Amino acid sequence: MTALLRIDDLHKSFGGVAAANGASFAVDAGEFLALIGPNGAGKTTALRLMAGLLQPDSGRIFFDDRDVTSLPTHARVRLGLGFTHQIVRPFYSFSTIENVMIAAGHRQTESPWRALTARSRQAARERAAAILARIGLAGQADQSPRALPLGQRKRLEVARAIALDPRLLLLDEPLAGLSSAEAATMADLIRALPQSGITVVLVEHNLGEVLRVADRIVVLDGGGVLADGVPAEVMARAEVRQAYTGTS
Amino acid sequence: MSGYVASLLSVIGINMILALSLNIITGFCGQVSLGHAAFYGIGAYTAAYLSKLGVPLLLTLPAATAMAGLIGAVVGLTSLRVRHDFLAVTTMGIGFVFLGFVRKQKWLGAELGISGIPASGLDPLAYALLIAVAAAAVIAFSLWIKQSWMGFTFDAVADDEDAALTVGVNVPAYKLTAFGIGTALAGLAGGLYVYFARIILPDTFDFVQSIAILTMVVIGGTGSVWGVVASTVALTLLPEASRAASDYRLLIFGTMLILVMRFSPGGLAGMARSFLGSYRARRRAAP
């Protein structure tokens, strides 16, 4: 397998506190990778660095062998590096289907000039409707995101990311705040993403679901990589149990 | 048609272009601007200066549009660094910088402005019709933007810039485009005003003018093309209706702004939508 995403010796500090401290790992195409670690381990910082929402103090990020370290978020998205927020951020002035349409029409929104000359939204609407049906939100298409419960808003966030045709999707705690039934449904949904050609990097606290869905786990601690491997093997390591669960 | 009606038509048309130009920046793209009169002024001074050099109207109007749009796009760079109330204060400062600059430039007439501007070559009625055609073109262009993917993307930027980035929108490019288009159209309004008034004074483009333009947008309904068109006609005609309304223009505009913000933040367009919604609901409920 070839690495689709590679991060190399990333460093990022906030007020002297190192949130990323030499983190290095790669993600292969088609893989489902989970980033785990105790609170403050640097998981979300690593994800935000990969998405371009933060700039590293040093280190490089490569996507499909291209150095994307200095690229802004929107440019990375257009290369196929999708991202979902930990706290959902739908466009509240849009309906549910319009939230997905704006992503499904990403070719029309590529530049202001192209957007000015493109008018038909029919193809984007049809694609958005298909994605909503696949993700179980067809019945909520015309509702405002304000009317959706958290579980459905989380699914909308994933639907919007899928509509961008990403090759790799960075998911920041998509199960946070969900009931165990909702979390299981969401985990099944994202587990199926690699089957449609989407590589997944998941940051998640829900260890039970992580162990169920991930192909590989990277454990972060203190902003660096503590362990990297298949879930059962990684979780059996003493240093991981020590850092992650506080027991040896 | 009397000269008075032609004059009224001209003022309505110029105000309409101005309000619709700000509507693209503030209503469509969500970028607050409190210094829009500066771009009206840049267009006016450009057209006035060139016309005094003997340049014909057919060239001064595009030059006024281009100059205001160019400077507007540069000013739009500030919107990439600051947001919301900080952007409002920054654009207000730009309005003051413009006034402070022109008032000290002898080659622009300093405090006395530019007078003796050559006639357009058209009679008042024909010139009023030219302004009306320009206003109609700006309405059509605004509607086109609103219905295109650009309008849809502006809506996303206005709603949540960070979320827009994550759906691949080049937010800085869209914000600069909104500033560029909006300020260019304000420059066109300024150019048209020059041949209508034949004299320009710095105070015509002051902070009060910026607020008057914003009032037309807010009362019409920020983002609504037809709402802004309706409010421009109403607010331009109001001071003409009575001497008292003219004398207390600022008081009336200010009071209307407060009332709209309190009772109908969607402006006239919001009221119309709400009325239509209840009317349809009543019709559906009727046996």
Image (spheres, rainbow, N blue to C red):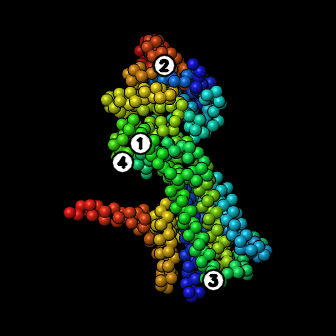
Q: Circle 4 is placed at which residue position?
A: A143
Same chain for marks 1 and 4?
Answer: yes
Q: In this picture, is B33 found above or below A194?
A: below
On whether disc 1 and disc 2 are found on a single subunit, the reply is: yes
**Amino acid type, residue under disc 3 in the picture:** Pro
Residue A212: x and y, percent?
Answer: 39, 20
Mark 3 and mark 2, same subunit?
A: no
The disc, 4 or 2, on the residue closer to the chain's N-terminal end is 4
Quadrant assignment for the N terminus of chain A: top right
User: Along the horizontal axis of the image, is A245 left or right of B201?
Assistant: left
Q: Which residue is mark 2?
A: A216
Residue B109, percent from left and from top: 74, 75
Q: Earlier in the sequence, mark 1 or mark 4?
A: 1
Residue under pointer 3: B124
Residue type at mark 1 is Ala
Question: Which residue lies at the image location 62% right of the left edge and 65% below the top edge?
Answer: B185
Residue under the point 56% across and 62% down: B141
Q: Residues within 10 Å of mark 4 (few under 14, many from 20)?
A: some
Q: Which residue is mark 1?
A: A129
Rendered image quadrant of residue A127: top left
Quarter of the figure with residue A186? top left
Q: Chain of mark 2?
A: A
SS at mark 3 in the image: helix
